[in-house]
Each structure stands twice: as structure tokens, then as C-alpha cells.
Image (cartoon, helix red, strand yellow):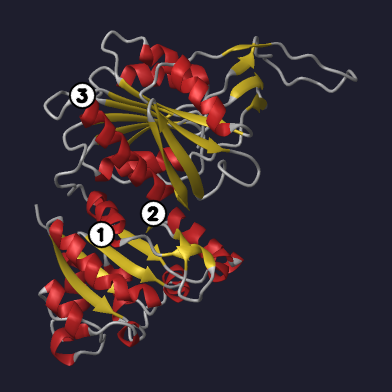
């Protein structure tokens, strides 16, 4: 399947990665037409880009020969997806405002294809309230924001704002329009759970936790880019639906339990990345509780254990757990690994400054005779790394000729 990608390159130092990005896209069957801004030409040459793309580079909205045929409209219609990588804060602001002073932003206004931006900028610029407000508006309009990652930057500082690596971007972009190609999970059916659950106290109050759903959504997206058919069972979150993924919205732990078992019948892989409540109120009061007494007692009972119910299925799946802990993370994770008889467990620390409700995470993956550490990275990048490791261990234990039954269990994101 040929995928038509308009690759917009704007004026950031990460433009030097553009030739590698083009190569990665073409490896996945993409036909790439590059459109550069004037600033981008200061960082990477059109000669190099034309050599790797095999197409003349477009940059001038006022190219008389090209525009005689309304070429900006032609490109907007030709594209299966428009990708801007790197995307600067300036380009994000222009797209939000609807400005179209150059060829690239004109195409963005004229296209009906999905648009994806891979931001790249100094970490202070990325965290600036104006940039974050623009990011939110773009996502609300259905534009996909890929990253950014966390790491060292050209300015010599470290933080969030680093453009995702070309291979990660290419995989996500091709998945936007279904051209997944041959991935590690090609042809597999995957169910992912994500986000918190809400356990009702009365019609206006509930018990919940700090999970944002970002890790679970990243896992669903990563599984899709690896060729899987993905169903995402999601608790209440404020996130755009991952492209190419079927999303089932639920509220409580009971709802998630039911939806998971409804979807899991012919599933190859189950990734339970949701932070499911351990307890719920024993009874839900039908009317709003009034503030009459100095104290109130709330009786709680156990919620259904999705991990135990899946692990108890007749065809025991390959299982991977998540241990989200505030202290003694590795010790508790090792205990859960043994007690639950898991094949792998992903351990990470959670708290107000890490784990929950953030764009980044760090993890240590443990198994019976080893471990591997993953340093702090964006949850998008971490999800891809985790899936690669899980696949490696699965095939090592089950053999490449088996029909995989892989379960990833998580207590947090």
C-alpha cells in the first residue's frame, strides 16, 4: 500500500533529522513530497532532501510554474497525511490562528487529510503557556501531536521539547491512515485498558485516582503502529482517541471488567494499563448526600480484579505486570512478579512529581533472571520500547511459530 505523505519541514535545528525521517517513511511504503519553509532552508539543504525523497522540493507559494496549476491545492488533495517535522512554536501558532503566509500553512488549511505535528523546541518554549494553549487547541481540532520527547537539546539544556526519533514518527504517521505495514504485532488483535475508573458515592461524587490515561493511550497507539488491530477500553480521560484504534468508553471498575471480557474473546494481546480502583462504595446513595453531620463513614468493598480474571482464563496468556509504587519499587515489583506468576513486570515510581498525570515516565522491567531499565522519556517513546521488549521475550519463550496470547497488566499510567 502506497501512502502519500506531505512532509513539512520548518526552521528548527531538528531539521537535520529530516533525511532520516524520509528514509524511514519510504521504508514503510510512503511516497514523500517535501515542503520546506524559508527558515528550514537554513538548517538542511534541498539537494539532500531531493536525493532521499526522489521528488523536487517545494518551498515557494509563489512558484509561478507550479502555481499555474494550483499546485498547493493539488498537494493538499494528494496527501493521505500531512506531517510537519520538526514543528516549531511559530508553525503551531500559525495553524491555530488560520494564517497561511507560506506554502506549508496554506496546504494545512486546504487539506482534508489528517495532520500531524512533531514539535521540536527548547524546553522553556514548549512549556510556555502560549505554546501549551496552542497545543490544546490543535488537539481539540483533531490535529495529532507526536511527542515531544525528553532529552538533551541543541542549546545544551535538557528537558521536554526534543523531537521524537524518526523511526517512531514514521511508524505513528503511517498508522494514521491505516498503512501499518509489517509490524511486530501484524495481524494480532489487542485489547488495551487505560485511564482511571470512577466509583460512585452518590449522583455527584465519586472515588478516583490521579491516572491521566496517557500511558495506556500510548500503548494502544504503539500497538497499532506495530500492525495490531486494537480495541481500547478507556476510563474517563481528557485525551484524543488514538488514530486507527476502536475506543470503548467506560466509567467504573465493573464497567471496565465487563467491557474487557466482552472484547477479549479472540484477543491475542491484552494490555491492562488502566489504574482500576481497588475498592468502591458498598452502596451508592441515590440522592446527593447532605452536609449534616461532623463525620461521615464510608464502607468500601473490593472491585473486580481484572488481572486475576484474565490470568484465570483456560488458555493462560503470556503476562506482564506493572507495579506502580511510591517506595521500595523494585522490591514490591519482585514480590508481585512471583505472587502473580507473571512473565515480566514493569516497575515505576508514582507520586506528585512522577508517573501519574505527566507526559513522561521511567520504568524498570523485571523478569525471573534479569531486568532492564528505561530512563525517563516521553510515554510515547517508552510505549514503543516496552512493546519491543515484550515481543522479544514473548517469542523467546513461546517460539515464533506459536499463536501469541500476550497479556500486559498495569496498575497505573
Residue drawn at (40%, 16%), measured in percent from left and top?
341
Tag shown at residue 8 = none
Q: Is residue 79 visible?
A: no
- Residues at circles 3 and 2 in contact by the CB criterion of under 8 Å: no
Nearest to the observer: residue 120 or residue 151:
151
Give how far across and how far down residue 366 sits, in percent.
Answer: 42, 32
How crowded is the residue under tag 3: few (<14 C-alpha within 10 Å), some, or many (20+)?
A: few
How many C-alpha atoms fall within 10 Å of the one at disc 1: few (<14), some, or many (≥20)? Answer: some
In the image, is 330 to the left or to the right of 287?
Answer: left
Q: Disc 3 designates what residue?
A: 398
Which numbered disc covers residue 142? 2
Question: Disc 3 and disc 1: Cα gap in Å?
Answer: 40 Å
- Disc on the earlier residue, 3 or 1: 1
Q: Is residue 82 above or below residue 306?
A: below
- First in residue order: circle 2 vs circle 1: 1
What kind of element bears circle 3?
Answer: helix
Residue that label 1 marks: 113
Q: Are marks 2 and 1 in contact (CB under 8 Å)?
A: no
Question: Residue placed at 28% from the left, 30% from the top?
Answer: 190
Taking the spot 18% from the left edge, 65% from the top edge, the residue there is 23
Q: Residues within 10 Å of mark 2 (few under 14, many from 20)?
A: few
Distance from label 2 to label 1 (Cα)?
11 Å
| Element type where label 2 sits in the image | loop
The quadrant in which residue 167 appears is bottom left
Amino acid at each position: 500500500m502506497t501512502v502519500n505523505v506531505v512532509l513539512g519541514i520548518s526552521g528548527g535545528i531538528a531539521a537535520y533529522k529530516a533525511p532520516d525521517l524520509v528514509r524511514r517513511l519510504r521504508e514503510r511504503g510512503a511516497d514523500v513530497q517535501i515542503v520546506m519553509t524559508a527558515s528550514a532552508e537554513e538548517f538542511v539543504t534541498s539537494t539532500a532532501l531531493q536525493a532521499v525523497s526522489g521528488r523536487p522540493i517545494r518551498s515557494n507559494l509563489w512558484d509561478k510554474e507550479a502555481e499555474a496549476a494550483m499546485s498547493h491545492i493539488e498537494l493538499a488533495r494528494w496527501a493521505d497525511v500531512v506531517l510537519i517535522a520538526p514543528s516549531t512554536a511559530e508553525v503551531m501558532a500559525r495553524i491555530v490562528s488560520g494564517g497561511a503566509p507560506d506554502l506549508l500553512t496554506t496546504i494545512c488549511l486546504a487539506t482534508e487529510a489528517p495532520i500531524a505535528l512533531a514539535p521540536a523546541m527548547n524546553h522553556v518554549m514548549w512549556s510556555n503557556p502560549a505554546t501549551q494553549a496552542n497545543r490544546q487547541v490543535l488537539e481539540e481540532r483533531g490535529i495529532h501531536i507526536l511527542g515531544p520527547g525528553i532529552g538533551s537539546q541543541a542549546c545544551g539544556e535538557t528537558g521536554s521539547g526534543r523531537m521524537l526519533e524518526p523511526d517512531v514518527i514514521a511508524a505513528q504517521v503511517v498508522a494514521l491512515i491505516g498503512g501499518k505495514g509489517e509490524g511486530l504485532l501484524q495481524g494480532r488483535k489487542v485489547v488495551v485498558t487505560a485511564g482511571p475508573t470512577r466509583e460512585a458515592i452518590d449522583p455527584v461524587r465519586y472515588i478516583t485516582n490521579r491516572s491521566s490515561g496517557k500511558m495506556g493511550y500510548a500503548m494502544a497507539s504503539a500497538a497499532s503502529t506495530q500492525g495490531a488491530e486494537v480495541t481500547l477500553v478507556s476510563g474517563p480521560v481528557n485525551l484524543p482517541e488514538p488514530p486507527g484504534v476502536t475506543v470503548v468508553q467506560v466509567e467504573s471498575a465493573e464497567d471496565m471488567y465487563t467491557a474487557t471480557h466482552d472484547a477479549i474473546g479472540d484477543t491475542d494481546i491484552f494490555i491492562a494499563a488502566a489504574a482500576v480502583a481497588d475498592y468502591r462504595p458498598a452502596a451508592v446513595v441515590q440522592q446527593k448526600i447532605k452536609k449534616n453531620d461532623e463525620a461521615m463513614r464510608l464502607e468500601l468493598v473490593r472491585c473486580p480484579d481484572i488481572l486475576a480474571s484474565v490470568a484465570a482464563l483456560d488458555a493462560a496468556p503470556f503476562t506482564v505486570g506493572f507495579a506502580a509504587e511510591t517506595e521500595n519499587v523494585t522490591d514490591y515489583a519482585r514480590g508481585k512478579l512471583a505472587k502473580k506468576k507473571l512473565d515480566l513486570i514493569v516497575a515505576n515510581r508514582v507520586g506528585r512529581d512522577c508517573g501519574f498525570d505527566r507526559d513522561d515516565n521511567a520504568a524498570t522491567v523485571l523478569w525471573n533472571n534479569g531486568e532492564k531499565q528505561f530512563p525517563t522519556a516521553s510515554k510515547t517513546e517508552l510505549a514503543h520500547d516496552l512493546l519491543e521488549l515484550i515481543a522479544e521475550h514473548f517469542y523467546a519463550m513461546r517460539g515464533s511459530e506459536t499463536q501469541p496470547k500476550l497479556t500486559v497488566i498495569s496498575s497505573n499510567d
